[in-house]
Amino acid sequence: MSISVHPPSDPGGVAARAAARTEPSASKPFGARTRTRLFTKYVALFVAVVAIALLSNGIFEVFFYYREHKAALIRIQHEQAEAAAAKIGQFIKEIENQLGWTTQLPWSAGSIEQRRFDALRLLRQVPAITELAQVDSTGKERLRVSRLAMDVVDSGLDLSQDSKFSEAQAHKVYYGPVYFRRDSEPYMTLSLAGTRKDAGVSIAEVNLKLIWDVVSQIKVGEHGHAYVVGPAGRLIAHPDISLVLRNTDMSKLPQVQAAQAGGSDADSESLQGAKNIQGQEVLTASAPIAPLGWTMFVELPVEEAYGSLYAALQRLALVLAAASLFAVLAGIFLARRMVGPIQALRAGAERIGGGDFGQRISITTGDELEGLADQFNEMGARLQESYADLEHKVEQRTSELKQSLEQQTATAEVLKVISRSAFDLQSVLKTLLASAAKLCEAEKGIIFLRKKNSYRLASNYGFSPEFEAFAKANPFPMDNASTTTRAAQSGGIVQVVDVLADQTRSALAREYQRLGGFRTNLGIPLRRGGETIGVFTLTRQEVRAFTPRQIELLQTFADQAVIAIENARLFNETKEALERQTATSDILNVIAGSPTDTRPVFEAIASRAKSLVAGFSSTVFRFIDGQTHLEAFTPTAPEADKILTSTFPRPVADFAPFRMAQSGEVTQVPDVEVLTDEIKDIGRARGFRSMLFAPLMNKGVSIGFIAVTRVEAGSFAEHHVQLLRTFADQAVIAIGNTELFNEVQQRTRELSKSLDDLRTAQDRLVQTEKLASLGQLTAGIAHEIKNPLNFVNNFSALSVELLDELKEVLESKDLDGKVREEIDEIAQMLKGNLQKVVQHGKRADSIVKNMLLHSREGSGEIRPADINAIVEESLNLAYHGARAENSSFNITLKRDFDPAAGMIELYPQEITRVFLNLISNGFYAASKRKETGDEGFEPSLTVITKSLGSEVEIRIRDNGTGIPAEVREKMFNPFFTTKPAGEGTGLGLSMSHDIVVKQHGGKIDVNTELGAFTEFIISLPRSTARTQAGERR
Amino acid sequence: MRRRKFIGLLGSAAAWPFGARAQEPGRIYRLGFLGSGPRNNYFPVFEPLRRAGFIEGQNLIVDWRAFAQQVDKMPELARELVEGKPDVLYASGDLAISALLQVTSTIPIVGVTEDMAGSGLVRSLARPDTNLTGVSIFSTELDGKRQELLIDALPGLKRLGVLADTRATGAPPLQALHEAARARNVELLVQPVTRSEEIGNAIEAAKESGATALNVLASPVFYAFRGVIMQRAAELRLPAIYQFPEEAKEGGFAAYGPSFVALYVDMVTPKLVGLLRGAKPSDFPVEQPSKFKLVVNLKTAKALGVAIPESFLLRADEVIE
């Protein structure tokens, strides 16, 4: 068999080429998909057939094997359980037998000692018996021996009613229920009666723990084990002795329940895996232990029981896998043989379908497939023939389409250019002309645009430069004497097939024709809103009319041109407006940024003016007193800038444009080279040729001007001139604003300063006035009172002495007792009165002295003193003073002196007075709070000094009653006191204030909270006391 | 289906409480041991531990304290042990166990003592609910049994000396002993011992007061000093009965009780192993020995010049000749 797909015999054919192109992309994915489908179908079918057979066989085998295995397991387990049950039964039977010979003798026969000896021997032989009691036929316990307790003889215990005894008597043997000693070890009572009536009963307590020896010997498989459960479901014996000792209840386990319910013939289902007490899945079989009512259980872990079954299953799975693999391989082989020729047929058919009609399929399998291949080949040949005919027609149609496509493409191109460069009118017009000329088979073309009353060349295509220069210099007037103007005037399309034959044309038109050399021309007016704004003209060098289709196309181009022109106009207008706006807003920004200075404003004006006109440099000048001052300029080269700055200021009269600017005119210098003055030199130095001057007009007066330069010579564009003029007007407003703003600010500053000064002066005046009047008043009063007071004091003191003298005189006289007594009494009273006068007189004196001190400033001398020592001294003085006045006075003093407080220049005497005063006040406030009946209150006063560098701070703080707000306002006023009349002069704080503030230049502050504390804070400068005091003197 | 069951089975096998569990590799286990005498007394512990894979010097550190000579310092010893952060603790006797319970309620303790439930150390033998488990060895009950055996072995005995550790034996058991002796017409001469140094003097005192035999009551201290006791008893020609069968083999006159070796190999060590492997004390019910052996050393009897009745010898589980 041979299968091949021949390449086409004629490789030159178009069809073959097309097929070759399409073949790789089309056939591959399609071929791959098909192959997989058919191939897998065959393979899958084959595998299925083989695998089903294998699988069903395997499943049957497993099923039967499983059943047999299980049956065998059940049988073995049951046998094991029965054997184990027999062993346990035997164990008990053994004990029973051993017990038997202790009941052989009647009680009358042997001595107790002999019986005891026998019993002890029994214990030796049967380790499971822990205790053995022997009871005579009447039910009296005669002997009890034990492994643990001491032996008891003739305890006399009556057991005749006990089931241990009665049951044994009745049935010869009695198996007691299982019980747990100390809740831990399983025990059972085993009683046995002798064969003779008078032999009595032996009662043994059997420790069932010893069954462990039996149970742990029973081997069930590899990991299985046997255990014994009592009638109530309690575990009696288990290889894990802990479970037994823990008195485990097995009755919850399903296998135990089943065994106890169903008796011996537990069916195979009970063998199914169930959890054992340790949670392991096991197969369990049971057998009853006959006389005892116990059940023997034998369990084997499921894992082990079914181990061999799983192994067989694994083997089977392996065989199945191997067989399946073989089936797959065989399937692949067969499918490949079947699919091969079909594959070749499909590939061939696919190529023919793809257009490769030269394709021939060769299959030599000799069967139906070969016939099918031949028919395919024939079909290919027929298709090839008809295809060639069809192709020719297609080619014709294609060339037609191509032509129209080119036109479309060109139009689209033009549209693209228009939309891309809307603001660049020249390039749009050029593109339009070029495309139109090419499409309409015209050699040349012109677009004329109307300017006032003429049509001027705006763009051309294909004409010589001479023609262009001529046309630009000589626009068409608005006549009817040329194709262009005719089209413009009529507003319709005008075509002149042979221009030379047209005799109505003007001389100008003839000149155009002579220079351009065209024969046929076509004019299409460019119209906007019913108005002609230009003409689109195309020319041909030979006489050949434009076809209607070409004209139609040209109309489209003309419309596009109109749109483009309009767009460009709008764009430029917007752009200019925007530029003006931007310039203005920039200036405003600068003003806002530096309102106090005009220089940045001028600089901004200079730089904006330059960029507005697209100039080379710019300068801003101001006229001051007939001189021109340079205010700002845009820098160029440093040397050039230097020339500029060194030239100005200059009189306005020096330069003509300056004069013009001063008169408010906009002027320009198209070329500085034609000038003869210094401007020419500056121009050469800075490198410009033309200049534009715009005056800065403020309320009709020119205050300066802006000059903009350009590198090239020539006139400035009209819109530039306008722009600069507008800009200059705005700049003037900006300058005005700045100046105004500055003025207002300056004025405000001056005003607020004078207001402050005024206020200070006023305050000072009020304070001085107040203190001066008080001082005068005090001094005056003091002087006036001092003298009378002296009299009162002196004379009262004298009177006391006189009274003593009087007494002496009366002493010598012989007076009757009663009279003498009366005289003495009166003298005593007088003396008392006088003493009161003296006392209060002295107080008045001290008030007066204080007042005088107050009015007289700066007593003692100024000298450096240790402030801490002064504070300490004041504190001691005040404390002892207070104690002297009132012996019950008590207060806690706290000191916190800063060692850095050190020396201060001050009047020690005066400062001591201040401290004494403040401390005494504190004592007063604290003791007053104590008096008001606060039980737990502890009066205390704290004095703190603290160095603050150039100052020292002293804080005197008491925890007294505090100062109300209304008192705080007035407390530094002279004569203001809150103490009851007669206790204070009202001068203490006022004086302290004066001493601290006026004499020492310090500060006194108070910090208080009502009912909590009062704190006076005194700050004293270290060394300014002298100068302050000096000034005051 | 089968496979799922099989996997389930594997899971349940992994959750098996102890037994199958092995030591964690690289871990060092610590055992705090509060025994009465020198550590070779406790060889039946260390051999099985070694077999279970706990090898001293490799993965096991045994913090050893012997208290027989310093009973007063029991609380300190207990504290030292607990400060060593052991995984499991062992203690002999009520006193040692109580001392450990005073200082820890979390570290598992295996104790060997007279009667765990009776002394209130655990609430239930079947389910200990604290950090303590262990073995109850009926020593007080057996003290009576031993007295009975000694009287049976020495017919005509009039005065029986009793060596009593005041810390191990209280007044009520002594009273019971007195009563039992009176029933057999034997006078009990109790020699209380508080400190180990007093043992020798106590035996002499018993001899001086006329005792012709000696019942060495159960006490971890006496077991630790059994060599001294046997030597003194031999010197003073006093047949004595001891707590553990092994003591008779070592030269004691007689002994009755559970085998010391079996006790530690079969009951104590499995618990230590289980607890070291992380089981909870409550997994182990308190065990009691159920096999007791009477051993009589005829060599010693001969040396002491004591004749033992044939009937008594027949009762012995083992006779050393």
Image (cartoon, grey):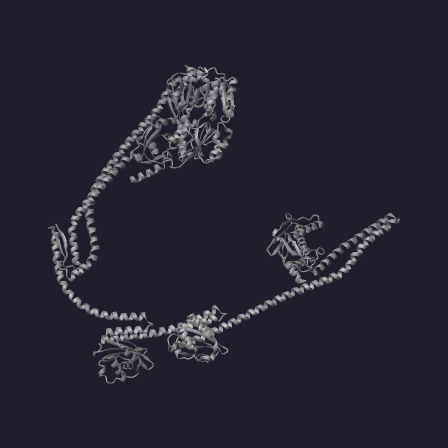
Q: Relative to the observer, which residue lies in front, A151 or A866?
A: A866
Is residue A141 among what the camera can see? no
Q: Nearer the viewer, residue A221 or A981?
A: A981
In the image, taking residue B10 as reference, residue A750 lies left or right, namely: right
Q: Give me the residue at 36% from left, 37% from top.
A: B15
Residue A669 vs A891, above or below: the answer is below
Q: Is residue A894 visible?
A: yes
Q: Is B72 placed left or right of A392 in the picture?
A: right
- The location of residue B37, given as percent across then percent down, is 46, 27
Residue at (17% x, 68% y) in the render: A396
Q: Nearer the viewer, residue A406 or B288?
A: A406
Question: Which x, y percent locates residue A747?
Answer: 55, 71
Q: How many marks?
A: 0
Q: Is residue A137 above or below residue A352?
A: above
Foreground: A274 or B174? B174
- Report the residue that reaches farthest toward the left: A366
Q: Residue at x 28, y 32 (%)?
A: A74
Tell me which corner region of the image, top left, top right, bottom left or bottom right, holds residue B291: top left
Res A68 quadrant in image = top left
In the figure, is residue A525 to the left or right of A874? left
Q: Position of residue A569 (x, y in %)?
A: 35, 75
Quadrant where the C terminus of chain A lies?
bottom right
Quarter holding residue A388: bottom left
Work out whether A94 lies above or below A425. Answer: above
Q: In the image, residue A990 lies at what x, y percent?
A: 67, 59
